[in-house]
Image (cartoon, grey):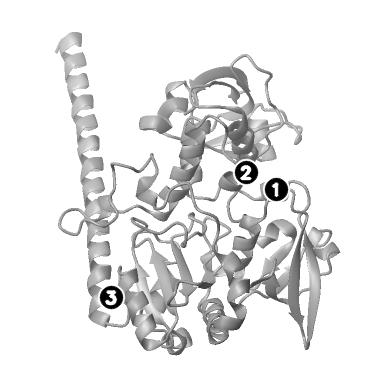
């Protein structure tokens, strides 16, 4: 065989292997899509057959609540998402810890955000499970559902915590006329758009309902897509992403409060040296009100923190401490909201598209700094590319020559001054969300095998 023939044979084999790999990936993608389709349709069939929950019909729930004189519990659940799957299963299938309490509510299950009234249902859209307790006139009694990390949901949500939130909501419902003025703050100002599918990033792609006659999964707006659409809306305006949109629903831990997931709003620990410690909070305190609003869960605390206006320095709090009701003031120190971590959030995937060319960046360990030849000084920037996007808009860093394992040591906007002080991915997002607009050129300095190099790509 001639060299030319051998080369042709080799190329043919390589091409066949590549085609086979693509076909395998496509088959896997189709199988996964079919599994998700079956999962969503199976959820509807199971819930309707069970007969305890009204499925995807808030109006019917309201009518039943008015007829029965019961409050509503409205659960939003992104069916294919794995986070909170165990909690969802236990709640849905009648775990005795909560089922008796749920019998005192009209139960409504909603598997989408399409058509969701954003003037009423405002929550941390990086979640895949959240619950609202409502009076039949849609007065918000409380929220339940929080998330503070990529996994380990049991540290944030539990059946016991949900039961406690439901019980507190029932207490408020029993005194609705008395507490109605205090509950008014549980609804916010009018949103940018009345429902998710009205946002420019989603408009024309989705409708207000799911397509059960066709492919239901592609017709669904996931919770995280709402958060992404909000950021994209502000980003497109060219004025930077507002602080409260970039850092939504701050967790109490940013102020030093670790909460007990098995209680309504009980402080498990107060970080030494934190603002909460200086304010006099103690482990075991039950927070019953914040900024005048009754609190039924950690999600309610996050709602109040999310609504705190710029310049607010303190929030009045009431805590139950043993037999005593104690009044405290929760201090909001400068920059408090920005101390939250963004990297765990599902919506950070879209921030990477906008601001890092599709790279998932993490602070390099001392060993990774040394191996790459990056600065070993921990005060100097060294962000390791844990992943580099391979497709579409997430592949701009890849197309510029960056690879997984590269350590980024500086970034500048066009001909601007290099930034070497962005020590975490969150600080990267924060700095570039405020200082760039779509189409700006980012020049990234990175180290690979001890050699410093540069690459550039456009932001989106």
Mark seen at residue 310: 1
Who's the residue at 65% across and 38% down the image? 427
Residue labelled with disc 3: 47
**Which element is circle 1 on?**
loop
Give whichever of 457, 69 is nearer the camera: 69
Point out residue 350 in the picture as x, y percentages from the top left corner.
Answer: 46, 40
Residue labelled with disc 2: 243
Who's the residue at 38% across and 82% down the image? 66
Is the residue under label 2 in contact with that under label 1 (CB below 8 Å)? Answer: yes
Q: Nearer the viewer, mark 2 or mark 3?
A: 2
Give whichever of 230, 348 is nearer the camera: 230
Marks 2 and 3, how far apart at CA: 39 Å
Q: Is residue 22 left or right of residue 164?
A: left
Is the residue under label 3 in contact with that under label 2 (CB below 8 Å)? Answer: no
Please state the total of marks drawn on the protein image.
Answer: 3
Vertically, is 240 above or below 295?
above
Marks 3 and 1, how far apart at CA: 43 Å
Point out residue 248 in the picture as x, y percentages from the top left corner.
Answer: 58, 51
**Which element is circle 3 on?**
helix
Q: First in sequence, mark 3 or 1: give its number.
A: 3
User: Quick check: can you spot residue 261?
Assistant: no
User: Quick check: can you spot residue 115?
Assistant: yes
């Amino acid at each position: 065989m001639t060299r030319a023939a051998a080369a042709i044979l080799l190329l043919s084999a390589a091409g066949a292997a590549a085609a086979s790999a693509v076909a395998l990936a496509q088959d896997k993608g189709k199988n996964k899509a079919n599994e998700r389709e079956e999962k969503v349709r199976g959820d509807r069939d199971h819930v309707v057959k069970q007969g305890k929950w009204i499925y995807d019909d808030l109006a019917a729930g309201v009518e039943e609540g008015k007829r029965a004189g019961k409050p509503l519990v409205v659960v939003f659940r992104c069916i294919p998402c794995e986070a909170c799957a165990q909690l969802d299963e236990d709640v849905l299938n009648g775990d005795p810890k909560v089922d008796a309490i749920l019998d005192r509510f009209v139960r409504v299950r909603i598997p989408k955000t399409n058509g969701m009234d954003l003037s009423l249902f405002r929550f941390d859209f990086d979640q895949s499970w959240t619950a609202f307790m409502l009076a039949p006139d849609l007065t918000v009694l409380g929220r339940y559902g929080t998330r503070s990390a990529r996994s380990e949901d049991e540290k944030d949500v539990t059946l016991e915590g949900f039961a406690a939130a439901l019980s507190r909501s029932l207490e408020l419902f029993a005194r609705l006329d008395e507490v109605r003025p205090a509950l008014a703050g549980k609804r916010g100002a009018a949103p940018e758009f009345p429902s998710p599918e009205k946002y420019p990033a989603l408009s024309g792609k989705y409708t207000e309902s799911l397509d059960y006659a066709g492919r239901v999964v592609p017709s669904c707006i996931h919770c995280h897509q709402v958060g992404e659409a909000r950021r994209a809306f502000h980003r497109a305006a060219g004025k930077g992403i507002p602080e409260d949109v970039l850092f939504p629903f701050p967790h109490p831990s940013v102020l030093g409060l670790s909460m007990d997931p098995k209680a309504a709003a009980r402080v498990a620990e107060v970080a030494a040296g934190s603002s909460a410690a200086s304010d006099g909070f103690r482990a075991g305190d039950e927070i019953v009100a914040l900024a005048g609003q009754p609190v039924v869960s950690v999600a309610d605390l996050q709602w109040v923190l999310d609504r705190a206006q710029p310049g607010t320095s303190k929030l009045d709090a009431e805590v139950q401490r043993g037999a005593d009701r104690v009044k405290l003031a929760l201090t909001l120190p400068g920059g408090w909201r920005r101390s939250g971590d963004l990297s765990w959030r599902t919506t950070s995937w879209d921030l990477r598209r906008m601001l890092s060319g599709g790279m998932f960046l993490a602070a390099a360990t001392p060993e990774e700094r040394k191996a790459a030849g990056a600065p070993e000084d921990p005060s100097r920037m060294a962000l390791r590319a844990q992943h580099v996007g391979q497709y579409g808009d997430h592949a701009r860093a890849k197309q510029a020559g960056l690879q997984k394992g590269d350590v980024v040591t500086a970034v500048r906007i066009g001909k601007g001054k290099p930034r070497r002080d962005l020590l975490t991915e969150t600080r990267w997002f924060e700095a570039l969300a405020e200082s760039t607009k779509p189409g700006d050129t980012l020049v990234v300095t990175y180290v690979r095998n001890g050699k410093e190099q540069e690459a550039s790509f456009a932001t989106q």
